[in-house]
């Protein structure tokens, strides 16, 4: 009957049914028996269904789990039969029968519902599939099995893994398998000796997975007793009132173990008093006088004396109970010998971890410093060398980033588009810088404060223009594929390629700056004009032209920095204002007019910020505040920055 | 003024149920105030809602307006400047004499407008998911309360993904702070130890995420499964997700669920490395219903093919249509009459099912959890039954005793322990 | 110089005719607005516009302070809006505390037991900090219960901050644009600090509902707004008198001399740092008072209000109005902030160019930015310069060399060309 119905409905929906589905195949029947759980699709309840499939011994079970995991299993909404399918286009499916893998036909997808196991269920399926996949011929499948073990290991995996070791042809996969085998041995090894050997084999290993295997072994439970027991699984003892064991927690422990009288919360006390109000009095005390905590304590004690409420511990009693007892940790994760080995291994690892973390933090700081340097280097030219306060510097960075975005609209290849975007961003912002210098800044060289205002006006106008043109949403600027991911040195020390690229770019700019300033005619003329424009003019240098080119050069570099910053963070009309104050700080702290100063300034700011973040990891905002405060104080003591210009150059 | 006001209220209260169309007491055109920032930092999110409102008003006018009147959208720009929200709200209510307002995004902008709304008895629809702990007589909250977004998402983490250790990352402002407080209390209730909850706050627009991402990875060192609950706001998400992708963190190892990341935010980055990470909302553009298809088509036809729809837009869609129905039922745009008519209003969600307006000014809505896909859309992996919004969370001791019921108790902050109304105005 | 020729006892008002004119205009304006208001008059001007006008008067006051410190003393401070904000926070704390205390006491009085002091303060704390996820009073709120102490804080907090910061900065001879950047850094640090929830001032949410004056819940805002409008007008009038007095005497001559050539003044034996510090601190106090009057009218204060950009805007107002003349600052602040309100309010008509419609909400900021540039380039005297043209004076007045503070008289002549 069911079969007829299936064929009938299939005839209705299928365009060209090539074959009919086998509804009585064992695998289909198994699925039907679990269909409620499968369709409900919740990790909490799915267990029995997966177990049934995994333990069925049916060859098709593996296919089912495979297809289910990759979201290729569909269910016919009418008949409830399961199939797997590939999407032909948006509206049609090519469906297959689980029983023999034969194609049933191409059907519209309206009558079918896709099963979407969430990542929790996918993990469980993966765990169940491990036993089938460990010795699979496809290396990818074997790798998937190892991934699954890493994510959710089970005791049964250990035996399967050991069995598969001998037959493993691929050396890399074999190494992974061996490592996993040792990790699983730590958790599930049959004998203590076996486990201890496995633990010792990981001496000094930095992998998160090793610590993840070791830490559960040294789990503790805090207990209290009158005297310290001498069992071998006792860890350190704790003082009540210390950070590790706050006073309230310690007392609660005693109360839970029935070693002390409970205390009462202020709210419960109030409730108890209210419940016992009679004729405007509580235990003979006027309600109106109960407006302080001591009065309420007395009233409650009076009630307790009458026996209407249970007596509670006073503060003195709490202290007494606490001093009567000792508090200690008991290891509950493993037998004492294993714990000892694990503790030893962990100690060695922790020391190494701390060292590597410091190194990682140093890398982060270096990367942040290079970003600040990149953002500030253009300013080091316009402000540092020429003395022009350009508040629109941040907007040049933004223009560079938007240039990158526009280029990506036209050139879909990311690598090529970045190669085009960098010179183009330089050209665009160079042009903007030259225009700005000619039209505005040139007239204000004698009035630096007004330059500040005028360029600020330009800055807000440019920001709004960017909003009007590109909209307010952030725009994507995507790095080419070879910049995805990170350079992983070990599980702790890693740095993303894009940050390395920024670091390299910063070094390149430093070199470019030094080259242009010290080795070219332009640099010579720039230095001459900066030091003494009149003298330079009388030597045949055109100061107007030099100023224009210098400003354009500084702005152009800001544009390239914009592309880099856009790649690593975001492209919005307001991205420039995030960097402007920091950039000025960097230049001022480093010392105006000296590129090495800017470099030192950026390094100091970057390392300082990361350092403060390290001390106060839960609040990044505080780090920025303290950093600025520090800079303000620093400038008090070295008003001219880290590297102060001396002599005549300082007068310029 | 006050006489007329009293009589309309009385008339509406008496006659609303029996003779809905009797009191055609409106001045044409009916004005709909739109209080969304069109410039400044919040413009990135709020301009979309302004466009949504203009579209909704247009659609309604095409249907023949309301009570025989044309609708007119009065758009002002509070420019992401919080005091301006109060100023512009007052201007809308007293100078433009709008009948209703739709507006605000951030909590602080809402708190800025609240005193003015309550003083002048205005009516505002607030469309964004928020931290709760507030109930104003003059505001209908069509976005999600914490129990309609944060709690179900955390449950999903606990039950479906088996997460045992939580990193709560947020931008340092009121919504993440309050939400994380609620979640911390909730997780402790569920038996998660305090040391298994890592909390971090970053400034608005934060871009340097490497250390925080490394910290999160390091949380896995004790063998527990780590999950990230992100209340990171706005464009700081872009840097965060880029760093996440660079660190190669797969959603199967450390899943991230975000409460402030929708289709709009994802349009700012390449999502191919983020596939599988999650977001919890009451609406996703990918919801497969005829109503949603129509809505998305209309939006794209109006705004351009590359534009996406998102959750706050749906909130305005529901809020506006409910208001239209309430006005039709009350036969007037008078605030108190409309407010009374709002309770129990039903309107179909774009995601299927029906939203109902509760006496605590919140909606019942289903909670959806979606996995990010390579095309920047979400694949809906979980959809709950409709959850009634709760103004005061049950997981913080101070607010567990509080209840909001404007219909019967006439109080938004009713202490059920002492059976008294703490205050009629809202706390701001 | 000519100062000596003047009779010594002549009141400032006569020495500065502009003071009389200004005060007269201010008085006329205040009375006029009151007559047209909803609260006390015929109701032509809406309450929201009264509030806008009241706030504008406060902005004029802080612009006056800015003019004193920049236009007269040559210190381009990008931190005066921080002082303004601190004044606002100081008064805001009392307003929030007192309002909440009334609510809490009322709700607790219904409870069966009389409240303990802890319950009251916990109640207030959870009302104020509940929205930001905390429920304990941070130490900065120690004096919030007392109006006199918080009023004192309005003056003391900005004053002390300016004193300490100014002492550090002037002592190490940080001048010119470096000082500007340093003050900007101070502002940024302060606003970042306040943005943290842990700062105890409600982080990004700031203090809100400030327009509801405790104990006056029955007084309509139309009345309260007029009170604040008057208070702001009085403060502006007094501030103007004070500033005019400061710049009129020998003190004024010294600070202008510092602006024009600091080194020369130092060689003449004046303690330049002390003068600068005095002006910096005085103007910070004026800014604090202006802020304390502004925020109860605005209704909310939050850290975004003291972000560096606010202080730059302040400098721009003064520049557009015309530096080195007190009425210039007032005109600039009033003009720019009112025009800004008009444009962002959506009332400004769109301009249709045929191929493109200029929507002022989008283009106003561009216009503002371009006008800064134009003012600095083509009209360094600002709007105040129009007055010079009107009264047919071609050369700058002896008090108001209206160019930059840095290079002194030589540059002034150059720029005149």
Image (cartoon, helix red, strand yellow):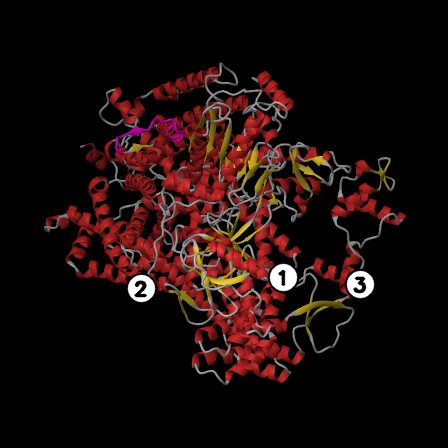
The residue pinned by badge 3 equals A259
Q: Which residue is mark 1?
A: A45
Q: Chain of mark 1?
A: A
C348 falls in the magenta region: yes
Q: Earlier in the sequence, mark 1 or mark 3?
A: 1
Q: Which mark is residue A504?
A: 2
Q: Give the side of residue B135 with respect to residue C50, left or right.
A: right
Residue A646 point in image, percent of width and height = 27, 56
Residue A524 to residue C248: above or below: below
The mark closer to the camera, 2 or 1, is 1
Q: Nearer the viewer, residue B384 or A525?
A: B384
Discs 1 and 3 carry the same chain letter: yes
Question: Do callouts 2 and 1 point to residues on the same chain?
Answer: yes
Q: Give the structural element (helix, strand or loop) at label 2.
A: helix
Q: Which residues are magenta?
A: C340-355
Q: CA distance from mark 2 to mark 1?
A: 52 Å
Residue B149 located left or right of residue A432:
right
Determine if residue C9 is in view: no
Q: Earlier in the sequence, mark 2 or mark 1?
A: 1
A359 in relation to A591, above or below:
below
To which quarter of the image does residue B54 belong?
Answer: top left
**Pointer 3 indicates a residue of which chain?**
A
In the rendered structure, the answer to whether residue A112 lies left or right of residue C243 reads right
């Amino acid at each position: 009957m069911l079969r007829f119905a299936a064929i009938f409905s299939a005839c209705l929906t299928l365009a060209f049914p090539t074959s009919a589905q086998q509804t009585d195949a064992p695998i289909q029947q198994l699925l039907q028996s679990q269909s409620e759980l499968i369709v409900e699709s919740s990790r909490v309840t799915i267990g029995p269904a997966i177990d049934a499939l995994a333990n069925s011994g049916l060859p098709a079970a593996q296919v089912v789990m495979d297809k289910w995991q990759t979201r290729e299993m569909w269910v016919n909404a009418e008949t409830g039969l399961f199939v797997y399918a590939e999407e032909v286009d948006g509206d049609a499916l090519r469906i297959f029968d689980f029983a023999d893998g034969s194609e049933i036909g191409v059907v519209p997808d309206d009558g079918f519902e896709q099963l979407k196991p969430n990542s929790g269920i996918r993990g469980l399926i993966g765990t169940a599939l491990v036993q089938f996949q460990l010795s699979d011929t496809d290396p990818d499948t074997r790798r998937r099995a190892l991934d699954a073990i890493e994510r959710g290991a089970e005791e049964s995996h250990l035996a399967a893994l050991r069995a598969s070791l001998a037959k493993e042809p691929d050396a890399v996969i074999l190494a992974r398998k061996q490592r996993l085998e040792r990790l699983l041995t730590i958790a599930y090894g049959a004998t203590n000796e076996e486990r201890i050997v496995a633990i010792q084999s990981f001496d000094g290993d930095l992998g998160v997975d090793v610590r993840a295997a070791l830490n559960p072994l040294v789990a503790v439970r805090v207990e209290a007793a009158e005297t310290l027991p001498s069992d071998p699984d006792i860890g350190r003892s704790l003082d009540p009132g210390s950070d590790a064991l706050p006073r309230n927690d310690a007392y609660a422990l005693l109360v839970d173990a029935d070693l002390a009288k409970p205390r009462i919360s202020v709210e419960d006390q109030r409730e108890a008093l209210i419940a016992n109000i009679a004729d405007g009095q509580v235990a003979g005390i006027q309600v109106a006088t109960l407006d302080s905590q001591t009065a309420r304590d007395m009233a409650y004690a009076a009630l307790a004396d009458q026996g209407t409420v249970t007596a509670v511990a006073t503060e003195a009693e709490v202290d007494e109970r606490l001093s009567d007892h000792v508090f200690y940790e008991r290891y509950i994760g493993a037998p004492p010998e294993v714990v000892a080995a694990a503790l030893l291994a962990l100690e060695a690892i922790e020391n190494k971890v701390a060292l590597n973390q410091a190194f990682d933090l140093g890398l982060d700081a270096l990367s942040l410093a290079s970003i600040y340097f990149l953002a500030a280097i253009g300013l080091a030219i316009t402000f540092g060398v020429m003395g022009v306060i350009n508040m629109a510097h941040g907007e040049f960075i933004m223009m560079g980033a938007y240039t990158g975005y526009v280029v990506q609209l036209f050139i879909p290849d990311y690598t090529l588009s970045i190669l085009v975007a960098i010179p183009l961003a330089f050209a665009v912002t160079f042009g903007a810088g030259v225009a700005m210098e000619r039209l505005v800044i040139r007239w204000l060289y004698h009035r630096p404060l007004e330059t500040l205002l005028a360029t600020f006006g330009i800055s807000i106008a440019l920001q709004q223009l960017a909003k009007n043109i590109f909209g307010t949403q952030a725009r994507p600027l995507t790095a080419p594929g070879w910049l995805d991911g990170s350079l992983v040195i070990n599980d702790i020390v890693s740095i993303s390629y894009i940050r390395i690229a920024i670091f390299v770019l910063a070094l390149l700019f430093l070199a470019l700056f030094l080259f242009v300033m010290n080795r070219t005619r332009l640099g010579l003329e720039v230095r001459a004009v900066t030091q003494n424009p009149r003298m330079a003019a009388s030597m045949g240098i055109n100061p107007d032209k030099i100023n224009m080119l210098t400003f354009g050069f500084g702005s152009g570099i800001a544009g390239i920095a914009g592309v880099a910053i856009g790649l690593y963070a975001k492209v919005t009309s307001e991205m420039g204002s995030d960097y402007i104050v920091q950039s000025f700080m960097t230049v001022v702290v480093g010392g105006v007019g000296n590129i090495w100063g800017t470099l030192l300034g950026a390094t100091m700011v970057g390392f300082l910020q990361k350092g403060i973040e390290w001390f106060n990891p839960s609040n990044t905002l505080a780090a920025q505040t303290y950093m600025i405060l520090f800079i303000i104080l620093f400038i008090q003591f070295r008003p001219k920055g880290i590297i102060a210009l001396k002599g005549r150059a300082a007068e310029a | 003024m006050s006489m007329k006001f009293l009589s309309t209220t009385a008339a509406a209260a008496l006659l609303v149920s029996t003779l809905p169309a009797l009191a055609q007491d409106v001045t044409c055109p009916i004005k709909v105030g739109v209080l969304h920032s069109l410039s400044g930092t919040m413009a990135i999110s709020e301009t979309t809602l302004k466009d949504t409102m203009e579209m909704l008003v247009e659609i309604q006018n095409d249907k023949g307006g309301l009570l025989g009147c044309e609708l007119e959208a009065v758009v002002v720009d509070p420019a992401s400047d919080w005091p301006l929200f109060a100023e512009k709200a007052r201007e809308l209510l007293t100078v433009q004499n709008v009948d209703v307002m739709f507006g605000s995004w951030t909590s602080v902008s809402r708190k800025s407008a609240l005193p003015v709304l309550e003083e002048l008895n205005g009516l505002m629809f607030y469309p964004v998911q928020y931290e709760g702990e507030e109930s104003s007589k003059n505001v209908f909250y069509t976005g999600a309360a914490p129990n309609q977004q944060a709690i179900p998402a955390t449950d999903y983490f606990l039950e479906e993904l088996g997460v045992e250790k939580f990193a709560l990352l947020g931008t340092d402002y009121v919504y993440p702070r309050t939400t994380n407080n609620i979640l911390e209390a909730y997780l402790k209730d569920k038996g998660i130890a305090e040391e298994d909850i890592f909390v971090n706050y970053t400034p608005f627009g934060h871009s340097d995420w490497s250390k925080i991402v490394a910290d999160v990875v390091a949380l896995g060192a004790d063998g527990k499964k780590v999950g990230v609950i992100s209340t990171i706001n706005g464009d700081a998400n872009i840097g965060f997700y880029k760093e996440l992708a660079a660190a190669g963190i797969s959603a199967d190892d450390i899943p991230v669920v975000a409460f402030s990341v929708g289709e709009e935010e994802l349009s700012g980055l390449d999502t191919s490395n983020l596939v599988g990470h999650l977001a919890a909302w009451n609406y996703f553009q990918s919801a497969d219903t005829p109503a949603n298809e129509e809505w998305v088509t209309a939006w794209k036809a109006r705004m351009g093919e590359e534009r996406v729809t998102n959750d706050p837009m749906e909130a305005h869609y529901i809020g506006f249509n409910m208001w239209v129905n309430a006005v039709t039922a009350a036969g007037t745009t008078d605030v108190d009459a409309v407010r009374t008519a709002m309770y129990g209003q039903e309107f179909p969600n774009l995601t299927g099912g029906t939203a109902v307006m509760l006496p605590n000014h919140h909606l019942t809505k289903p909670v959806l959890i979606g996995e990010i896909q390579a095309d920047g859309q979400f694949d809906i992996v979980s959809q709950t039954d409709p959850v009634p919004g709760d103004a005061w969370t049950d997981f913080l001791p101070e607010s567990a005793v509080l209840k909001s019921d404007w219909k019967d108790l006439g109080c938004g902050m009713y202490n059920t322990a002492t059976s008294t109304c703490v205050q009629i105005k809202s706390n701001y | 110089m000519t100062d000596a020729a003047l009779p010594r006892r002549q009141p400032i008002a006569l020495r500065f005719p502009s003071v009389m004119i200004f005060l007269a205009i201010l008085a006329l304006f205040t009375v006029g607005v009151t007559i047209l208001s909803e609260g006390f008059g015929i109701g032509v001007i809406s309450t929201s516009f009264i509030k806008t006008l009241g706030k504008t008067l406060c902005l004029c006051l802080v612009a006056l302070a800015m003019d004193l410190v920049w236009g007269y003393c040559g210190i381009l401070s990008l931190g005066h809006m921080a002082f303004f904000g601190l004044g606002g926070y100081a008064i805001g704390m009392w307003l929030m505390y007192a309002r909440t205390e009334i609510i809490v006491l009322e709700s607790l009085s219904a409870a069966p037991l009389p409240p303990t002091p802890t319950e009251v303060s916990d109640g207030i704390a959870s009302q104020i900090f509940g929205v930001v996820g905390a429920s304990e009073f941070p130490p900065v709120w120690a004096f919030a219960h007392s109006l006199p102490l918080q009023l004192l804080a309005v003056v003391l907090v900005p004053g002390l901050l300016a004193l300490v910061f100014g002492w550090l900065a002037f002592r190490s001879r940080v001048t010119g644009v470096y000082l500007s950047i340093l003050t900007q850094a101070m502002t940024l640090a302060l606003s970042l600090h306040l943005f943290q929830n842990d700062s105890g001032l409600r982080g990004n949410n700031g203090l809100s509902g400030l327009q509801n004056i405790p104990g006056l819940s029955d007084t309509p805002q139309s009345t309260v707004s007029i009170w604040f409008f008057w208070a702001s007008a009085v403060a502006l009038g007094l501030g103007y008198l004070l500033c005019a007095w400061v710049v009129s005497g020998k003190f004024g001559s010294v600070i202008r001399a510092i602006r024009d050539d600091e080194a020369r003044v130092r060689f003449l034996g004046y303690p330049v740092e002390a003068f600068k510090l005095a002006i910096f601190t005085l103007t910070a106090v004026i800014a604090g008072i202006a802020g304390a009057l502004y925020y109860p009218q605005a209704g909310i204060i939050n850290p975004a209000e003291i972000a560096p950009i606010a202080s730059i805007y302040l400098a721009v107002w003064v520049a557009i109005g015309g530096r080195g003349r007190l009425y210039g600052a007032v005109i600039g602040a009033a003009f720019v902030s009112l025009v800004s309100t008009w444009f962002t309010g959506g009332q400004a008509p769109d301009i249709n160019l045929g191929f493109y419609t200029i929507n002022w909400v989008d283009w106003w900021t561009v216009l503002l930015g371009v006008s800064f540039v134009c003012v600095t380039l083509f009209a360094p005297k600002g709007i105040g310069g129009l007055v010079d043209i009107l009264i047919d004076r071609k050369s700058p007045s002896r008090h108001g060399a209206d160019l930059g503070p840095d290079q002194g008289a030589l540059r002034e002549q150059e720029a005149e060309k």
